[in-house]
């Protein structure tokens, strides 16, 4: 049975309980939720293939859909807060990534954490709940908690970005191509063994050359670049670590540094519904794109 629809499909990582799914639900609730189908597609590897395989081949060109996923270390953020894409092909342009590393990065806000903490403490005073973390230590202390944890991650994040650079600029995360014509069904001009063998050898050489870019020397060069960038005063003064450092890593380090503090997982569940999207131009842009697709 065909799933083609006059509405649009929004594919995201994880399950229906994921932050990604809940963020898309929040974005679409004020538009036309009945015309937006959110599909949780599991992990990011093979993610866009899953989305494309969701429709019949003859429907794919006309079907309106967006693949929305975490940026992770797959593409560098731009100077402006904007949505990012993976690849330049037409279908790849439908794969949109967060501007910040992942959804958690949008929620690690001292004011929002403080509000949650105070609210839960007040509930304890009024209802004798089992809240065991006392009152909030204050916005300044929470901001210091985030920044100190980020500084502890500085070198680890530099390594992750350096590795990401090598993977992006090599064929290492791509399969060796089986044709030089652009795809199955597109035949080369010559089908002789000699010419086909020659083209095949070229593909192998191109693949090996690209893979050879992954060397310890190139890794150390990229690592030095990120170490220098992450050590700049402006990087910390402008809280850029909330954009560059992975939110899940930051969450883990924060909990390790202050194990007696609140559970950030529980906080995220509370915060996702209260996220002020107007403070994030990229999320507002995503909403606008969904609206545009609905109007087409």
Image (cartoon, rainbow, N blue to C red):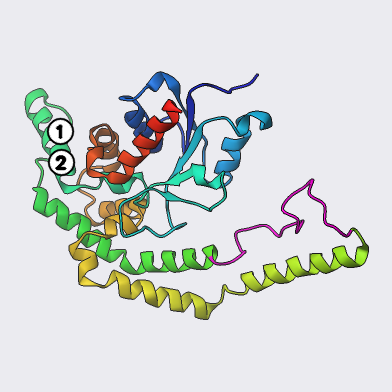
Say which residue appears at 41% left-offset and 18% top-offset: 34
Give the alpha-carbon distance from disc 1 to disc 2, as whole Å: 9 Å
Q: In which quadrant of the rendered image does the N terminus lie? A: top right
Q: Which residue is located at x 44 percent, y 58 percent?
A: 75
Which residue matches tag 1?
120
The answer to whether residue 160 is above or below residue 101 is below
Q: Secondary structure at mark 2?
A: loop
Numbered mark located on residue 133 in the image? 2
* Residue at (48, 23) in percent of width and height: 7
- Numbered circle sitting on residue 195: none
Q: Which residues are magenta?
A: 169-190
As displayed, is residue 32 above or below residue 122? above
* Residue 44 left/right relative to 155: right
Locate residue 213: give its quadrant.
Answer: bottom right
In the image, taking residue 174 as reference, residue 251 lies left or right, namely left
Image coords of residue 260 (percent x, y): 20, 48
- Tell whether label 2 touches label 1 (CB within 8 Å): yes
From what the image shows, is residue 130 above or below residue 93? Answer: above
Is residue 18 something one can see in this rendering? no
Looking at the image, tell me whether mark 1 or mark 2 is earlier in sequence order.
Answer: 1
* Residue 78 image offset from top left, x and y in percent: 35, 58
Pinpoint residue 200: horizontal percent, then vertical percent.
80, 65
Instruction: Give residue 176's quadrant in the image.
Output: bottom right
Within-10-Å neighbours for mark 2: few <14, some 14–19, many 20+: some
Q: Is residue 254 visible?
A: yes
């Amino acid at each position: 049975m065909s799933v083609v629809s006059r509405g649009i499909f929004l594919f995201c990582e994880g399950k229906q309980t994921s932050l990604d799914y809940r963020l898309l639900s929040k974005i679409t609730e004020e538009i036309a939720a009945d015309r937006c189908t959110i599909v949780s597609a599991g992990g990011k590897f093979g993610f866009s293939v899953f989305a494309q395989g969701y429709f019949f081949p003859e429907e794919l060109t006309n079907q309106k859909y967006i693949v929305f996923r975490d940026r992770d270390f797959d593409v560098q953020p731009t100077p402006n807060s904007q949505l990012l894409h993976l690849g330049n092909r037409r279908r790849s342009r439908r794969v949109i990534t967060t501007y910040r590393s992942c959804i958690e990065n949008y929620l690690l806000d001292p004011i929002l954490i403080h509000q949650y903490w105070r609210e839960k403490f007040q509930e304890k005073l009024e209802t004798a709940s089992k809240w065991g973390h006392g009152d909030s230590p204050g916005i300044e202390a929470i901001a210091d908690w985030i920044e100190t944890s980020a500084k502890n991650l500085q070198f680890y994040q530099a390594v992750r970005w350096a590795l990401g650079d090598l993977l992006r600029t090599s064929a290492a995360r791509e399969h060796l191509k089986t044709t030089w014509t652009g795809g199955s069904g597109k035949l080369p001009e010559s089908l002789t063994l000699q010419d086909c063998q020659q083209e095949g050898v070229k593909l192998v050489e191109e693949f090996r050359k690209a893979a050879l870019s992954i060397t310890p020397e190139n890794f150390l060069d990229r690592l030095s670049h990120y170490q220098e960038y992450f050590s700049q005063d402006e990087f910390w003064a402008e809280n850029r670590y909330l954009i560059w450092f992975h939110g899940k890593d930051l969450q883990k380090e924060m909990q390790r540094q202050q194990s007696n503090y609140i559970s950030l997982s529980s906080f995220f569940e509370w915060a996702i519904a209260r996220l002020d999207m107007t403070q994030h131009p990229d999320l507002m842009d995503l909403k606008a794109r969904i609206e545009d697709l609905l109007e087409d």
